[in-house]
Amino acid sequence: MTGAVTHVRQRVIPAAEPGSPETHSDPGGIDIQPPPLDIEPPGCAVLVVGCGNLLRGDDGVGPVLVRHLWERGVPVGAKLVDGGTAGMDVAFQMRGADRVVIVDASATGSAPGTVFRVPGAELEDLPPLQGLHTHSFRWDHAIAFARWALGEACPTDITVFLIEAAGVELGAELSEPVTAAMEQVIEMVERDYLAPLRPQTGAEHTVEFTADGYLRLDAALAASRFPSDAVAAVPRDDDLWLIPLRGPRSGGLLLKQRTPAGDRAVLIREVLADRVPVGVREASWDDAHKALRIPLDRH
């Protein structure tokens, strides 16, 4: 979705008259009513949306960035969305989020890899919605539509990161300057938005070994450290190391949901040669090795 910076037009969306239903009319005179809010997804503390077309080189930097963040683990309270080129979907995903980060490619004529950080205070004037076709939706249209359709449920803390594209040829990969810029934006998003939601390194987490050979993790721990539900379990010295994998295709063991709240369990009996130390343990996250270390002996 390149060209977003150069195409932002300065216009304030008109508010409805006091006491009247909020509507907009297209050029044909058809009144458009905002959809009911109860069909939208639940809110979150931080929503990160990557916009763009993965098939067109640097235009896909937003979705690629989201995938890199996902591989790091999604902390509780955060939501990552591959917005693709469907701007209207992005608008609905924003409902109830406390903070929103949108990442997209831009085409302003600046040097490839230039990063623009546009704070929400500069996004007050947005494009008009009348006559807009879904295929021409961009991130700025998504924000304008969200403010109209979601009302008070639309977040006010919105930041847009734009990365200047070098090329958007069909089938091309990300260019070197855009890849380097993407890594910078990943670190900024992690530092300013996701890190405050993550458990502290070395913090203890309660896990449980069961008599039937399972290891149980609570929903918060599973979501923040093992988002793919695929793990490697490796006994090392007096600990069991639980290491997150990219997905089931990477092999390893599967974390299975065991409660509606999202608690997980993984069958660990064979890894420990049927010597499962039944009971509760205090595990700690080892950031250097990207593993959850669980003591096998009680101390």
Image: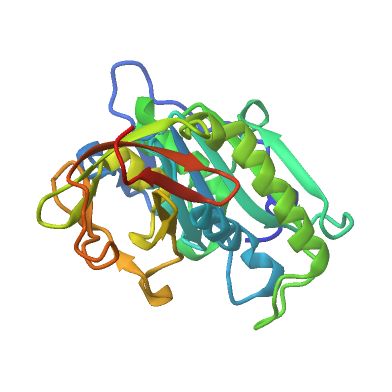
Q: Is residue 197 visible?
A: yes
Image height check: is 217 above or below 108? Answer: above
Say how many tags the image has. Answer: 0
Q: At 71% across and 53% down in the image, what residue appears?
A: 183
Give the camera-side residue of 89 and 100.
100
Q: At 40% across and 48% down in the image, what residue appears?
A: 238
Q: At 21% across and 54% down in the image, what residue appears?
A: 276
Q: Position of residue 173 (x, y in %)?
A: 69, 76
Q: At 43% across and 46% down in the image, what residue appears?
A: 293
Q: Is residue 27 visible?
A: no
Q: Position of residue 68 (x, y in %)?
A: 57, 58
Q: Quadrant of residue 234?
A: bottom left
Q: Position of residue 127 (x, y in %)?
A: 59, 43
Q: Quadrant of residue 77?
A: top left
Give the camera-side residue of 200 and 38.
200
- Type of colouring: rainbow
Give the camera-side residue of 88 and 130.
88
The quadrant in which the N terminus is found is: bottom right
